[in-house]
Amino acid sequence: MAEPDPESVLREDPVLAAVIDRRDPHPLEPVENEFERLCVSIINQQLSTASAAAVRDRVFDILEGVVTPASVLDASRDALREAGLSRTKVDYVENAARAFQERDLTRAGLADHTNEDVIAELTEITGIGKWTAHMYLIFVLERPDVLPLGDLAVRRGIEQLYNDGDELPRSEMREIAEPWRPYRSTATRYIWAEYEA
């Protein structure tokens, strides 16, 4: 029997059906360099989109566009700091680089891991929390059923759509999202698109 497509499952929720009618989902760009994507997530932590983009461009210039564990570990810490990374974030990207050298955290290396296993593997790295692990699951591993309630835009988007913008506890958000299984990642991308519009 053919798998139902994500859209037909998500359209069973009338609120989400209306979003699907007016928005394209937040884009998923193919990721060729998993380590680079993880570094971008670390750079993005607690920064506005514009600030994060500026810092990322400067960091990538220092690495001459080659973002690998070796290039990060070879880079001057002072230069990375001058590019706009805090001392803590320099530690975090270096921790990620060492973890990538020690373990296979690529798409192939994590193929047999459940989402929970991936989160456990990644959050072992100092500087990578659940939010970053969820972004990695969605954007790098392209897992179909991730609900990143650690993401402020997802929470605000759900509150706008389902509660007139008033605050909701995460337990209620999980209940709202239950019918979206096994396509909560796609639902998340629609919520981002609606929130950003």
Image (tube, helix red, strand yellow):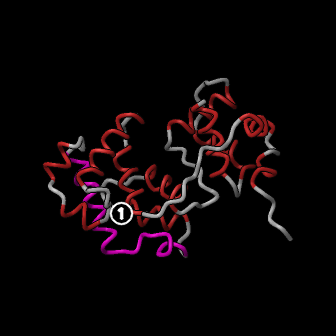
Is 39 on the left or on the right of 177, as rendered? left
The image shows residue 196, relative to residue 5, as above or below, that is above
Is 188 on the left or on the right of 105, as rendered? right
Q: Quick one: which residue is furthest to the right in this view?
A: 1
What quarter of the picture does the C terminus occupy?
Answer: top right
In the image, is residue 88 part of the stretch drawn in magenta? Answer: yes
Q: Secondary structure at mark 1?
A: loop
Residue 147, percent from left and from top: 59, 50
Asked whether 196 or 171 is in front, the reply is 196
Overall secondary structure of the magenta stretch? helix
- Residue beneath disc 1: 124
Is 67 on the left or on the right of 105, as rendered? left
In the image, is residue 7 part of the stretch drawn in magenta? Answer: no
- Span shown in magenta: 87-111
Asked whether 8 or 162 is in front, the reply is 8
- Name the residue located 30 percent from the left edge and 41 percent from the top edge: 55
- Name the residue located 54 percent from the left edge and 44 percent from the top edge: 149
Image quadrant where residue 81 sits: top left
Q: In the rendered structure, which amino acid carries the disc numbered 1?
A: Glu
The image shows residue 112, relative to residue 125, as above or below, that is below
Residue 193, percent from left and from top: 62, 37
Label 1: how many Cα within 10 Å (few below 14, some 14–19, many 20+)? few
Residue 78, percent from left and from top: 13, 49
Is 13 on the left or on the right of 24, as rendered? right
